Amino acid sequence: MGTKHTCAIDDADNLWCWGGNREGQVGVSTSAAQYYFRPRQVGTYKFASVTAGGSHTYALTRSGDVFCWGKNDRGQLGIRSHGTSAPTPTQIVP
């Protein structure tokens, strides 16, 4: 659980997130300042784990890839676009 969003992995290893999406932390291709009151599926990968920060999210796939999305104002996503949000999962560890 992040500050205003939550993510969970279902029994089929699909990732679902919901809640506040001001910084793209829900991972559904927009950083529109809106709330998702119902879970939205994130990506099509099979996920092993997920963790949420204040306004960002990280997830590990079953194949060992690491993805991140959400707020990146202090480089917390580990991607080069420091200062901008990433509203969809961005692979950081292949």
Image (cartoon, helix red, strand yellow):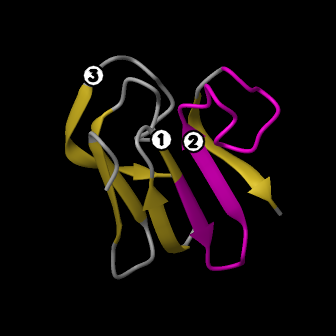
Q: Residue drawn 72% across and 67% down? A: 65
Q: How many marks?
A: 3
Q: Is residue 40 magenta?
A: no
Q: CA distance from mark 2 to mark 1?
A: 6 Å
* Residue bearing the label numbered 1: 27
- Circle 2 packing at 10 Å, graded few (<14), some (14-19), many (20+), is many
- Circle 1 packing at 10 Å, graded few (<14), some (14-19), many (20+), is many
Q: Residue drawn 70% across and 35% down? A: 75
Residue 64: x %, y % from top left: 72, 76
From the viewer's perspective, is residue 60 above or below residue 1?
A: below
Mark toward the start of the polypeptide (3 vs 2): 3
Q: Residue drawn 53% across and 31% down? A: 71
Asked if the residue at tag 1 contacts the one at tag 2, i.e. Cβ–Cβ closer than 8 Å, the answer is yes
Q: CA distance from mark 3 to mark 2?
A: 16 Å
* Residue bearing the label numbered 3: 34
Q: Quadrant of the N terminus?
A: bottom left
Q: Nearer the viewer, mark 2 or mark 1?
A: 2
From the viewer's perspective, is residue 32 above or below residue 8?
A: above
In the image, 81: left or right of 20? Answer: right
Q: Residue drawn 62% across and 79% down? A: 62
Residue 82: x %, y % from top left: 74, 26
Asked if the residue at tag 2 contacts the one at tag 3, i.e. Cβ–Cβ closer than 8 Å, the answer is no
Compare residues 11 and 1 and report the one nearer the observer.
1
Q: Amino acid at mark 3?
A: Gln
In the image, 13: left or right of 67? Answer: left
Mark toward the start of the polypeptide (1 vs 3): 1
Local SS, label 3: loop
Local SS, label 1: loop
Residue 54: x %, y % from top left: 40, 42
* Residue bearing the label numbered 2: 69
Span shown in magenta: 58-83
